[in-house]
Image: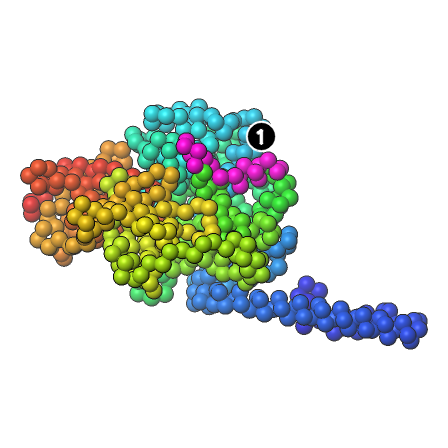
């Protein structure tokens, strides 16, 4: 046994203890002291062995990434105010052979949002702005969308503003390109519509938190990077942390972002975007520990700021959302759980906190693909909080969910499309369970009865609800989905691929004025392909008649083509999970038609 902090094993320590205490002490007392030491040695040794066994189990969670030929993750496990285990797995830089350590610096993506929220709350506390201020007070160039959008709407993702990162994708600007605050603001200001009126629904959008970075700049005269350094990171001693608003900046100990290469191995996956607020904090797991501890001993912001960040938002109808300010407010296996994940180009991150147990798992990673840091964070919690989960689950034993036969579940399987949201929902039956699949995620569906299912953890207060109802022909189902506080109707669609010869019906050039974007669609080798200046050709995959899907930088987009009365294709609507349908009008009809 060895104490890594002191560099001294317990037996050596015992020998020194004996020499120091036995000199000049009667024999009877020496025996008593020796017995006391042996008992302490056994207790401490047993604890050390138990901790080592637990650490080995944690290491096995990351074993897939713990190689010199692979990117990987840094981990810090926090309990009762201290890091009880930290480790690096895999490589920070494959070209230079640099291994990941707990001091490696990663981009943590959307985990950054809680820091932006704290910056706004600090300004609220100083009376420099109010949560109920109209954001056009600070950003007057934004259009008026029919109702006031407040700071509170931005913080809780209830503004209805389209996600600017997805808009860049639809314009055809790749993440590897250079974009600035001005580029993002010009794109946002051009938007003449919103996903919904403010406060009516909850829908995650990076635009909300990017705009807050601009508001900080206009209110204080400092960039968010400067403000956070002075008011948040500096006071907390987060010396390896900053908002990365300069793509040319040299960052000591920075891990490179990677993605799986189609031919095997990995390729570099980095971005030159310079927008911050919605993401772009670069930090280490050891600095994240200091941020995590501010939620228990709030040096920055005080208890009132922590209350704001950890209180769920409320919709216009009084319904509570699952989101506080930069944090999801949730439950896991019966315990209170606050969390946020982050993903940006080749980086992934997860901050998972069980506040009542003062337990957190902090993970930063440098690879996309099938890596899922939040799932790994849950597995770590399952190990350390096993007893607490058992007690919590016994206290919250719910009624058994209705049993639905596999044959009955198969009736619900299929693909459903919403004209309102432009989204697809695909359901499959796996291992006698109905699951909903989307890019990179699989959601178990929990039967409630009467054709109704819910998602998320069985004991969570925040469940998305899906109701299958018989359609007119009584052979197919119509789906009513409650995902953000308001329902959307999804119709069953058949995944029939059009004949290659009919793909020419879609070929042409299409334009959207809000994006200042043009798409040229051509048919190559029997595939419908999107072409834009300075971007790689992108195949559109048939999903259902007149509907095609393809990949975004994060997630997928769907294009649904519209026809006139004669059946000729005249436009399409493009949509993502965070941008409701936007119309592209056909302006050039190709000769093949």
* Residue 315 x %, y %: 42, 34
Query: Residue, x 58% and y 28% (percent of image)?
Result: 126
Q: Which residue is mark 1?
A: 125
Residue 366, by quadrant, is bottom left
Query: Residue, x 44% and y 33% (percent of image)?
Result: 318
Q: Nearer the viewer, residue 278 or 429?
A: 429
Q: Nearer the viewer, residue 547 or 313?
A: 313
Magenta stretch encompasses residue 590 = no
Q: Nearer the viewer, residue 516 or 133?
A: 133
Q: Is residue 321 above or below residue 125?
A: below
Give the number of callouts: 1
Question: Viewed as shown, does residue 176 lie left or right of 323?
Answer: left
Label 1 element class: helix
The residue stretch that appears in magenta = 302-319
Q: Quadrant of the N terminus?
A: bottom right
Residue 480, by quadrant, is top left
Q: From this viewpoint, is residue 205 visible?
A: no
* Residue 162 x %, y %: 34, 37
Question: Viewed as shown, does residue 539 lie left or right of 79?
Answer: left
* Residue 21 x %, y %: 86, 69
Question: Viewed as shown, does residue 434 lie left or right of 251?
Answer: left
């Amino acid at each position: 046994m060895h104490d890594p902090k002191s560099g001294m094993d317990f037996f050596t320590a015992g020998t020194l203890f004996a020499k120091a205490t036995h000199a000049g002490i009667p024999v009877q007392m020496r025996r008593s002291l020796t017995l006391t030491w042996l008992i302490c040695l056994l207790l401490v040794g047993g604890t050390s062995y138990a901790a080592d066994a637990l650490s080995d189990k944690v290491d096995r969670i990351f074993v897939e990434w713990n190689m010199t030929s692979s990117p990987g993750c840094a981990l810090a496990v926090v309990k009762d105010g201290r890091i009880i285990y930290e480790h690096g797995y895999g490589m920070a830089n494959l070209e230079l052979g640099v291994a990941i350590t707990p001091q490696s610096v990663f981009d943590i993506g959307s985990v950054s949002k809680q820091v932006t929220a704290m910056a706004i709350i600090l300004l609220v506390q100083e009376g420099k702005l109010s949560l109920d201020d109209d954001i056009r007070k600070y950003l007057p160039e934004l259009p008026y969308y029919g109702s006031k959008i407040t700071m509170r709407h931005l913080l809780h993702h209830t503004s209805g503003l389209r996600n600017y990162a997805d808009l860049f994708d639809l314009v055809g600007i790749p993440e590897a390109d250079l974009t600035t605050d001005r580029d993002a603001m010009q794109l946002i200001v051009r938007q003449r519509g919103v996903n919904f009126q403010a406060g009516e629904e909850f829908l995650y959008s990076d635009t909300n938190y990017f705009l807050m970075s601009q508001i900080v700049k206009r209110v204080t005269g400092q960039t968010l990077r400067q403000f956070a350094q002075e008011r948040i990171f500096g006071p907390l001693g987060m010396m390896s942390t900053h908002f990365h608003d300069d793509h040319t900046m040299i960052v000591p100990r920075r891990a490179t972002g990677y993605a799986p290469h189609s031919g095997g191995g990995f390729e570099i996956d980095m971005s030159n975007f310079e927008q911050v607020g919605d993401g772009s904090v670069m930090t280490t797991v050891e600095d994240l520990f200091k941020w995590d501890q501010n939620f228990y001993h709030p040096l920055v912001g005080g208890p009132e700021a922590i209350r704001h960040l950890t209180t769920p938002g409320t919709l216009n109808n009084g319904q509570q959302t699952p989101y506080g300010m930069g944090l999801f407010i949730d439950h896991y296996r019966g315990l209170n759980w606050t969390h946020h994940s982050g993903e940006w180009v080749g980086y992934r991150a997860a901050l998972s906190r069980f506040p009542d147990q003062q337990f957190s798992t902090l993970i930063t990673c440098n690879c996309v693909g099938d890596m899922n840091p939040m799932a790994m964070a849950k597995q770590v919690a399952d190990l350390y909080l096993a007893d607490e989960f058992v007690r919590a689950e016994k206290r919250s034993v719910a009624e058994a969910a209705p049993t639905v036969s596999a044959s009955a579940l198969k009736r619900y399987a299929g693909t459903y499309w919403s004209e309102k949201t432009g989204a697809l929902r695909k359901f499959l039956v796996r291992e006698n369970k109905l699951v909903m699949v989307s890019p990179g995620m699989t959601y178990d569906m929990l039967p409630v009865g009467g054709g109704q299912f819910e998602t998320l953890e069985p004991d969570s207060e925040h469940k998305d609800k899906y109701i299958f109802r018989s359609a007119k022909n009584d052979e197919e189902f119509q789906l009513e989905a409650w995902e953000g506080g308001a329902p959307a109707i999804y119709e069953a669609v058949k995944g029939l691929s059009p004949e290659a010869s009919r793909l020419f019906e879609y070929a042409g050039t299409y334009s959207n004025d809000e994006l200042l974007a043009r798409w040229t669609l051509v048919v190559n080798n029997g595939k419908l392909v999107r072409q834009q200046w300075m971007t790689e050709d992108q195949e559109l995959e048939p999903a259902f008649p007149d509907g095609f899907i393809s990949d975004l930088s994060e997630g997928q987009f769907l294009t649904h083509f519209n026809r006139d009365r004669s059946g000729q294709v005249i436009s399409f609507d493009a949509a993502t999970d965070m941008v409701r349908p936007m119309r592209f009008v056909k302006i050039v009809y190709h000769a093949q038609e």
